[in-house]
Amino acid sequence: MAASSFHGLAQANGRSEFRPKQPKPEKRDESELLTVPDGWKEPAFSKEDNPRGLLEESSFATLFPKYREAYLKECWPLVQKALNEHHVNATLDLIEGSMTVCTTKKTFDPYIIIRARDLIKLLARSVSFEQAVRILQDDVACDIIKIGSLVRNKERFVKRRQRLIGPKGSTLKVRKVVLDTMKNIHPIYNIKTLMIKRELAKDSELRSQSWERFLPQFKHKNVNKRKEPKKKTVKKEYTPFPPPQPESQIDKELASGEYFLKASQKKRQKMEAIKAKQAEALSKRQEERNKAFIPPKEKPVVKPKEASTENKIDVAAIKEKIKKAKNKKLGALSAEEVKLKMEADEKKKKKK
């Protein structure tokens, strides 16, 4: 039988084999392969995926500070209960100050020991048990960033670390933001970029395109302010000649004439200078002692000035005014006005 008469018939080593034609793969859009469908979740790792378990035992240990001992001792039964569900043993050594996790024969998940290691690391770094136990979930991860050696100056380190701490002690959860903050780049710039990326990811058309044109470009402006020294050294004018040689003790004695004096005369001069200093100090000391015996200056007694006759108050006139005001009713006529009115009424009657 000829090989050319049948498609897929081949002859090898004296025998013929039939190979069916393989269908051509359908062309799919690459954007569909890159995107994850909404609502899809990776299935949990169960015992059916690894029924035989692990071949060898794995363990991790970490130290914790002394101030965490009381809290760990209190919540350790909860830690053991959470790890026993995944068949992982946990031990707390208060003498050495360490926590250890290890797998058992019943452990089937090979990655659970890494999550248990992260759990004890978080507990050692002052994370509460309620938050740290979430690391055992498949959709939760953690990253411990050591920022202590990134900034040398302690004051700058504290200020930049304060930018990362939010309300109720919560911190930013992006490694790049944390590292840029310690490099003196404010976190608001990176947060704004992340917000724009989140909005762009919602658009199905822009998922496969470059986002550089939408992202803001922040220029790093670092103004180097050099501190001026407290003591400014003024440079002297350059001269080719060396500075004059300072006078020695012998030169000074020659200039004053002490060099030619005898030893007894020099000794006498020194004694006189010492006595003069002692007398001056004694007189100053005596003046300070005498200050205690000097009476303080008394203030002169000021006699009270007699009230002038011009400024005297006429009490009698004030009393008369008060009496008149009491007798006079509101809106009533005075006695003189009443008399004038009565006279006017009488004249009118006479005319009639």
Image (cartoon, rainbow, N blue to C red):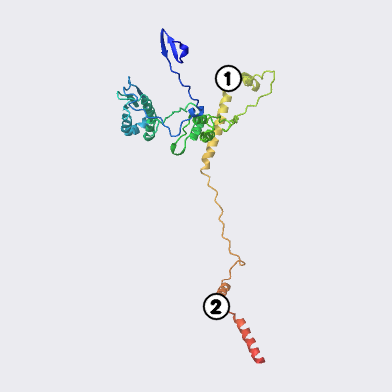
Screen quadrant of the N terminus: top left
In-image side of 246 versus 209 (left or right): right
The image quarter containing residue 313 is bottom right
Nearer to me, 25 or 290: 25
According to the image, label 2 marks what residue? 327
According to the image, label 1 marks what residue? 263
Dot 2, crowdedness within 10 Å: few (<14), some or many (≥20)? few
Q: Measure the C-alpha gap from mark 1 to mark 2.
A: 114 Å
Amino acid type, callout 2: Asn
Amino acid type, callout 1: Ala
Percent x, y of residue 190: 53, 33
What number is the disc on residue 178?
A: none
* Label pair 1/2, CB-CB below 8 angstroms: no
Disc 2 secondary structure class: helix
Q: Is residue 230 above or below residue 342?
A: above
Label 1 or label 2, whichever comes before in sequence order? 1
Dot 1, crowdedness within 10 Å: few (<14), some or many (≥20)? few
Q: Residue at x 52, y 41 (%)?
A: 290
